[in-house]
Image (cartoon, grey):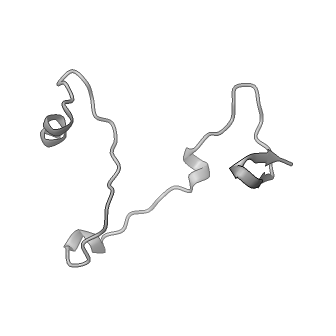
Amino acid sequence: MSILRDQLSIPDGQTIVGGVALGYADPDHVLSTQRTTREPVEAIVDDEAPGRTRSKTRHVTKGNQVAEL
């Protein structure tokens, strides 16, 4: 974690709670053969506004607008 703190100038008083790896896997590296289980996106993403219930069907229109049906 100290490498992240140094490279990103994160103060010691702040806690790093997550990270995202970007780039290409090295197929020759042993870690590239390891796979972890993943929760489905629906289990961790909440797109509901307070007081609004989730629509059962969604349709993406031109311009990437989401219409609830």
Left or right position of 32 against 38: left
Residue at 36% across / 68% down in the picture? 35
Please give the name of the residue rendered at 57% of the width and 53% of the height, measured from the top-left corner. Answer: 41
Q: Is residue 56 left or right of residue 25?
A: right
| Quarter placement of the N terminus | top left
Name the residue at 77% across, 53% down.
61
Residue 37: x and y in percent read 44, 62
The number of numbered discs placed on residues in the rendered structure image is 0
Q: Nearer the viewer, residue 35 or 26?
A: 26
Expressed as whole percent of the image width and height from the top left, the position of residue 19 reads 33, 45
Instruction: Judge by depth and name the residue closer to the eye, 27 or 66.
Output: 66
Residue sticking out furthest to the bottom:
28
Residue 60: give x, y in percent of width and height.
75, 54
Height in image: 54 above or below 51?
below
Q: Is residue 15 left or right of residue 56?
A: left
Which quadrant holds residue 3?
top left
Find the residue positioned furthest to the right.
69
Q: Is residue 29 left or right of residue 34?
A: left
Whether residue 14 is situated above or below residue 64 in the rendered picture: above
Task: Find residue 7 and report its horizontal and vertical position in percent.
Answer: 16, 39
Q: Nearer the viewer, residue 63 or 13?
A: 63
Q: Is residue 16 above or below residue 59?
A: above
Figure quadrant of residue 2: top left
Residue most toward the top?
Answer: 13
Q: Residue at (21%, 21%) from the top-left corner? A: 13
